[in-house]
């Protein structure tokens, strides 16, 4: 199942989430891929947002019985975590160069090569949606469809750049502190989920809060640096050959970005928000 040239290798560990973790060595460093399901079935590749991994990002979807039954009946799921975001990840050495968004997109291609995958469907969340959109632009023949949740496609605004700079400074000096966690939870969840009518957080927000405590702050900071240096993909969007489905909440901080993306793509796109 590997690359016969030996350029990509894997170390496999069984972990209890109905699948198997593979640590794939790529030309841009190791990357964790958690595989769930029958590898003879069509492939669905996921990529999570900043500070999230497959567990904290997709647990709500894949623990929902009806959705899980539908997905696992039809697909084998390949969860790609951003570098250093996997469960139990060690801190990435400061001697390791910070990758570019293009490097991360190339990692996705190498993961597909390792598993011998041809055409795949990709599902990404915010920063992960950007990486998978960039991958789809670079390897149009390998992407059959895109499912994007609160996606990014433009370069950061000055407001976002400043916000990310503050977040990275907090991560550097204070780690995954309360302010950082609250800011990230606002990025992921609506006000209704974060605080219901009784003033209580939903179970999924509480679970995500606990999982954020397990993230290595230096690794989160590195991924945030990568995404803060992204470039505009707008001009390439019409070249996408695959159908695209975009989900975005009406009150999402990325609502206008998603609408911009919808407006710039052709009629093969559907936006739900």
Image (tube, helix red, strand yellow):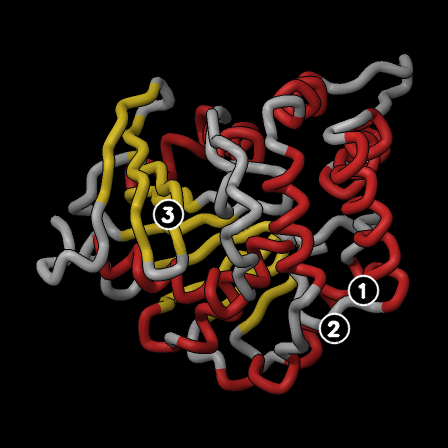
State the SS at label 1. helix
Residue at the front extreme of this rendering: 95
Compared with residue 133, is residue 178 higher up or lower down, i.e. above or below? above
State the SS at label 2. helix
Lateral position of residue 259 relative to residue 96, left or right = right
Lateral position of residue 80 relative to residue 157, left or right = left
Judge depth for marks 3 and 2 and give the one in front.
Answer: 3
Q: Residue at x 86, y 23 (%)?
A: 195
How far apart marks 1 and 2 lie (CA) works out to 6 Å
The mark found on residue 214 in the picture is none
Q: Residue at x 57, y 80 (%)?
A: 237
Classify mark 1: residues with Cα within 10 Å, few (<14), some (14-19) or many (20+).
some
Percent x, y for residue 269? 56, 71
In front: 168, or 206? 168
Q: Which residue is mark 3?
A: 30
Classify mark 2: residues with Cα within 10 Å, few (<14), some (14-19) or many (20+).
some
The mark nearer the N terminus, 1 or 3, is 3
Q: Which residue is mark 2?
A: 260
Percent x, y for residue 209? 70, 23
Percent x, y for residue 54? 48, 36
Compared with residue 176, is residue 70 higher up or lower down, i.e. above or below? below
Label 3 close to label 2 by CB (< 8 Å):
no
Q: Which residue is mark 1?
A: 256
State the SS at label 3. strand
Q: Residue at x 21, y 48 (%)?
A: 9
Label 1 close to label 3 by CB (< 8 Å):
no
Percent x, y for residue 90? 49, 31
Label 1 close to label 2 by CB (< 8 Å):
yes
- Quadrant of the rendering where the C terminus is positioned: bottom right
Compared with residue 190, is residue 155 higher up or lower down, i.e. above or below? below
């Amino acid at each position: 199942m590997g690359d016969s040239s030996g350029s990509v290798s894997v170390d496999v560990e069984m972990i209890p989430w109905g699948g198997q973790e593979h640590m794939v060595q790529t030309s841009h460093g190791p990357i964790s891929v958690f595989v769930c399901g029958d590898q003879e079935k069509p492939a669905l590749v996921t990529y999570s947002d900043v500070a999230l991994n497959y567990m904290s990002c997709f647990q709500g979807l894949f623990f929902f019985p009806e959705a899980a039954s539908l997905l696992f009946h039809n697909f084998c799921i390949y969860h790609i975590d951003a570098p250093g975001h996997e469960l139990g990840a060690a801190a990435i050495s400061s001697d390791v160069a910070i990758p570019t968004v293009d490097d991360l997109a190339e990692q996705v291609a190498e993961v597909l090569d390792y598993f011998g995958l041809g055409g795949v469907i990709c599902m990404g969340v915010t920063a992960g949606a950007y990486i998978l959109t960039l991958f789809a632009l670079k390897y149009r023949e390998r992407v059959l469809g895109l499912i994007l949740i609160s996606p990014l496609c433009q370069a950061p605004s000055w407001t976002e750049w400043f916000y990310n700079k503050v977040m990275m400074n907090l991560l550097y000096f204070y780690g995954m502190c309360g302010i950082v966690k609250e800011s990230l939870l606002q990025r992921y969840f609506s006000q209704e989920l974060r605080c219901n009518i009784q003033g209580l957080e939903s179970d999924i927000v509480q679970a995500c809060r606990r999982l954020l405590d397990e993230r290595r702050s230096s690794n989160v900071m590195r991924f945030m640096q990568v995404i803060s240096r992204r470039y505009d993909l707008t001009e390439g969007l019409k070249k996408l050959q695959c159908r695209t489905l975009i989900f975005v909440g009406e009150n999402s901080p990325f609502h206008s970005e998603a609408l911009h993306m919808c407006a710039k793509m052709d009629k093969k796109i559907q936006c739900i928000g």
